[in-house]
Structures are given as structure tokens and as C-alpha cells.
Image: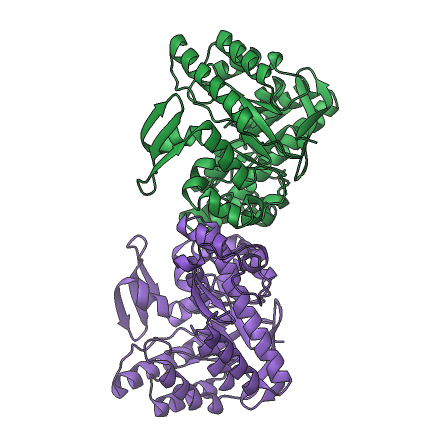
Chain colours: A purple, B green
Amino acid sequence: MTLHWRSVHADGQARAGVLVTAHGEVETPVFMPVGTAGTVKAMTADAVRAIGARMVLGNTYHLMLRPTAERVARLGGLHRFMDWHGPILTDSGGFQVMSLSDLREMDADGVTFRSHLDGTKHRITPERSVEIQRLLGADVTMCFDECTPFPATHAEAAASMRLSMRWAARCREAFTPRAGHGLFGIVQGGVYCDLREESVAALRAIGFEGYAIGGLAVGEGQAEMFRMLECTTPLLPDDKPRYLMGVGTPDDILGAVARGVDMFDCVLPTRSGRTARAFTSRGVLNLRNARHAEDAGPLDPDCDCPACAKHSRAYLHHLFKAEEMLGPMLLTWHNLRYYQRLMQRLRAAILANRFDEDAAAIRAGWQERHAA
Amino acid sequence: MTLHWRSVHADGQARAGVLVTAHGEVETPVFMPVGTAGTVKAMTADAVRAIGARMVLGNTYHLMLRPTAERVARLGGLHRFMDWHGPILTDSGGFQVMSLSDLREMDADGVTFRSHLDGTKHRITPERSVEIQRLLGADVTMCFDECTPFPATHAEAAASMRLSMRWAARCREAFTPRAGHGLFGIVQGGVYCDLREESVAALRAIGFEGYAIGGLAVGEGQAEMFRMLECTTPLLPDDKPRYLMGVGTPDDILGAVARGVDMFDCVLPTRSGRTARAFTSRGVLNLRNARHAEDAGPLDPDCDCPACAKHSRAYLHHLFKAEEMLGPMLLTWHNLRYYQRLMQRLRAAILANRFDEDAAAIRAGWQERHAA
């Protein structure tokens, strides 16, 4: 049986479900830690499991350049390579080609670019992207698309979206069905509801195991992003998972789950952890701030991670001041654990038909801003 | 009862024993991972426990500058600060003042220097060093001494050693006896056996809970170091622990245990781990070497650490090439685990009266150089 999603319960548009993959089941809504280059930065695979994560993301662009998809395949695939035995979703490479590589040349067939690492020339087409993701062994393969720049005029967004829809059909063609594996289409269309509607229709006509919403969180702001979700998710099939790519803050996630999204990924918890920013039940803290220097209290009294359960804010402050690697390690751990606990709480709220109340309580907690 | 050591068995001069401290018992010979600034670099405290380490070292110089000994004391001491509940040995600050600080001024009473961090002026005397180590909560306090530079003439080494002996008497006076805590004297005298002998006599006349051998591994070479051990350890009391400061390579440790040393510390396994050098049962490997790029085999087939049990050499190579933090994390873990397993094996060999045979077998393993 192919990769699929089954609904467990809905509270308004918010959905609780289970994603069934070749590497196990994953409860949704789910947040996937980002393992860009075959590692969730500053975390062992055991630690990623320990925080409760069940699914991670890998980046096609990074892995195709180093160590290369072919090498990962010869070494037994990405799961074995990084010692991650749960499901893996890989992106298509398109987004990073646009944001990281040099000398990009787009054509109707694909994109040619130079590596940001060593300047070597590479090419990704829809077929090659799907092949790379197969070599990596992804449970979820993403269609190769063009992430429409922001801002873009209606005409630009339409042309870009239609190119992505043609590529989506080619990806579907190139994808080899395998048990527990699936291909997700990506809705594009910028900030234009009519284009999002056209994109959904094009993707549904092709048919995918899941539907991603792409081209958001690129500068349009939360209100516009939510507006796009509102005109997109109601059009998507009820029985397929929905994935909002690259999102986001805890507040973004609350709003997106409320609007019917099931899956998320973002570098925010890991990247913030490396720069001393901590997400907590009472808002965001910067551990470099001098006011933490003698604070014997825990980072977040509601958290059970090692940073909170075993250390003081003063110790975390010290680690960042002394530029000790353990600072990023502990704070990455904490932030990922915070995101996991948030997702667990949202799922429990959906199951209890109290999503709106619990979301409001979570938001109120952030406003306390560590007054205590 | 004060901190003490009891002999369990001896094989030749090699000794197996137990160090009894306020924070538990430690089997000797023991290697103490270095936790310079309140963290064993790239390791959580849980990971340090998991590799089997039972005692760690903290650096007075680093901690007195940041976060300061007084702040650590206000936060409950170094054990709580770094979540390490086993014994801690702190050095006296003398060695790092000489190697790291700016504008040092020695006088008969102590040393004044500027911080390498911010240029602020500080002073350490024997009394202040003992006070700092008490504030940190060290189980083993080291006497403040001058690490005699190498090379030094006999006259220079004699003058330096005699200054350290006067300071040792002042440290003994300043040290407040507490249950399970102890003060170690440090034998100096450069590479001159007569001075080492004079130093041992001076320290024994004062009386300490343990005896360290200092001023070695500073450029004199292994043969000279072993020669100094041979003219020093036979003069030390049989019923007190002996600590060779800042040593060393696995081969140094084999030779020093054979010559009657019980305790070791060194940054080598941790620092090497951050620079892709791995200690293994078959010698030292550099994981950056391209020959590991497609090697699906484990780093060390004899090792049970996560780097060896869960990953390939190819993965470790990839992590270092991609400058991922997980590379230093996994290799530090491995190297410390290697050192712990080495010490366990040496202790078992002593208990079985086969130290020389086992040491020879270990050395032979290093020569295999991964021929397989």
C-alpha cells in the first residue's frame, strides 16, 4: 500500500490524523525537524528520537552536492546514513537552488546552477529531482517546482505556477510507486487566491499522496499567509495530508493547524537554538541577555528537556558567553522539544474538541513573558 | 573522613585502587575528561556519564574569569552548575596563567596578570587559588605552583621548584579540611632527578591527600617524562594517589601506569575529536581523509560508542567535510569512550597480573593501522 493519511478527528478545520509510511506511522499535526545535510544540526539521532520527533526532513540540494545522492545510495540510503529509522521527507531542491546557488539558469525543462560550495555546474530537472529523492530513499518525495519570488505580479505568479504544474505532471510520471512511499504536489500561486485555486485543480487532476502549500513564508507576512491558507485548504481533498512548507513560528503553526494544515518543517527551532534564542511556554528568550547571568531558575519550568531539567538559565547564559558548543546543543534540544510538546498539545486539543480554547491559552502563556 | 585512596592490587609498579571522595568512589587508574569552562566540550553531562567517566577536571583560570568562582558558588557550586554529580578535580590556575594570560608579573607572593578575554587585571596567590577551588566546590584541590618552563637550567628549575614548595606549604595552611575533600601537592623539578627527589621530600614533610607530578609533557619528550616518573614515583607514599598532570596519549598513559601513576587528565581526546582525529584500537585515524568517503565500515569495530555502533566512517567523514557540529560531537564521544575503555582494560590487566602482556597487546593493535 502506498503512503497514506487517515483522519482520526477534526475540530473545526483543525485535523488530527495518522500518516502511514514505509518507516512507521506518524501522528499529525506533525513538526519535522530539519536535517539539512544528513544531520539535524547539533543533535544526535538518538536525541532527535528522545525529544519525540517521528519524522525529519532532508534537503536534496545539500545532499546532491555533498556527499551526493549516488554515494548516499551506495551507503544504503539516507535512513542508514544518518541513523534515522523513522520516515524522511525530502524537498525537491528547487527552493535552495534559488536561495543558495550561483549563476542559475532556468529553462522550461529545469534549472542549471553552480554549487555554492565549489562552483561546479549541476542541473536539476523534475525527473532528476525525483531520481535523487529515490536514491536518498525518501518516504515522501516532493515535486520539483519553482518557488515563486515575493513580491510577484499576478502575471509573474501565474506563469511561475503554471510552469510548476507542468513539472508536477512530469514528477508524477517519473515517480516509481513503492509501498509506503509517496509523492506530494505543491500548490503555488503567490498571494493570489484565483491562482491558488487553479493550482489546486491542476494538482488534483494529476493526483498525489499529499498536497503541500508552497511559496509562503517568503516575506508576505502572517496575515497574507493565513489568507492564502483560507482560500487553499478547503479546496484540497479531505483524505490527504497537507503540508505547509518552511513554516514557522509557534504562532504560525497554531494559525495553520486551525486552517487545516497537518505537516510543518522549519529551521527556526534549530537555527534559533544556535543563536541563544529559546522558545518557551512564556515567550521567546535570548539567553545571551545579562539578566540571565545569575538566574538559578530553569529556562522553562514547564519543559522536561535536559536544558530545563538539569541546568539553570545562568549556566546556559555562561555557555553562550563562553562560546561553548554545549550551548547550541542544549538550546537546539530544548527548542525542538518545545515544538514537539506544542504539536502534542495541539493534537490532544483537537481530539478533545477544544482546539480554539487551548490555542488561546497557549498564546496567553506567551504574553506572560516570564513576569514571574 | 578526608578524601583518600585505597590500594586494591598491584602488578609490578602498576596499581589498581579506589579513590574515595565526597562525590563517590572512583576506580583507578582513571582518566579524567577535561571540562575547562564548566563543560566537557561538545558533550552533555549525561553523555560524559554514559561513556563511563566518573571524575572530571575543571580549570580554575577559566572559571575565575568567567563566570567567576563567586558566581558559581552563589549558583550552588560547580557540580550543580554543570550537572556533574561525581567528583571534580580543579587545577590551581597556575598553568593557564602562564600559557594564556597577558602581562604576567610573578613575585614571591603570587602572580598578577591580565585576562586573555577582556584585559582585566587579576591576581592569584596560593591562598586565593585554594579559596577559588573551595568556592567551586572541588573534591580535589590542587596546590598553586609555578609550572617550570622547559627547557630550564638546573638552577632555574631548582629556584622554581623551591618557590612552588613554599607555596605548597601556604596552600596546605589555607585549605579547610572537609569530609571527602583533599589537597594534592605537586612535585616539580624539571628534568632533574635530584630536584624531583628534593621536591618529593618537601611535599611529604608537609603531607597531602595525593601527589601530582607536574611540569612534564611540556616538550621534554616521552623518554625524559618516563625517566622522571622512574625517579619520582618510587619516592612517593604507597598509600596515596598519584596524578600525572596533563598526560597524555594512550601510549603515554600505558607507560605511566606501568611506572605507578593512578590519575590522568588531558585535552587530547576532546581536542582531537573536534579536529577529526580518532583514537582507535588500531591506531589514530583522520576522518577528513578522502579514503573514508565511501567506507561503510565502523570507525572502530571494537567500540560501542554511538559513532561506531550507529554510523559509518563515510558518515563521519561527511560530517567533518560539511562542518556539521555532529562531527565533533560524535568524535569527542568516541575518543573519550576509547580512553575510558583503555583505562578499564588496564585496571583489569593489573587485577589479573598481566599488565605487561596486555599493554604489549594494546600497542600491537595500534600497529595494525587498519590494515583490514
Q: Position of residue B57 (x, y in %)?
A: 54, 36
Q: In the figure, A365 relative to B198: above or below?
A: below
- Identify which residue is drawn at 50% across, 7% down: B194
- Identify which residue is drawn at 50% across, 46% down: B72
Q: Is residue B180 visible?
A: yes
- Identify which residue is drawn at 52% across, 88% down: A237
Is residue B204 rendered to the left or right of residue A97?
Answer: right
- Identify which residue is drawn at 57% across, 79% down: A346
Q: Position of residue A58 (x, y in %)?
A: 47, 63
* Residue farthest toward the top in the current orientation of the protein: B194
Q: Position of residue B341 (x, y in %)?
A: 63, 35
Is residue B139 rendered to the left or right of residue B327?
Answer: right
Q: Is residue B44 visible?
A: no
In the picture, the quarter occupied by the N terminus of chain A is: bottom right
Viewer-side residue, B308 vs A310: A310
How many marks the image carries: the answer is 0
Viewer-side residue, B271 vs B173: B173
Q: In the figure, A239 relative to A54: above or below?
A: below
Q: Position of residue B160 (x, y in %)?
A: 42, 16
Is residue A230 rendered to the left or right of residue B76?
Answer: left
Q: In the figure, B161 relative to B245: above or below?
A: above
Is residue B322 rendered to the left or right of residue B54?
Answer: left
Viewer-side residue, A40 vs A209: A40
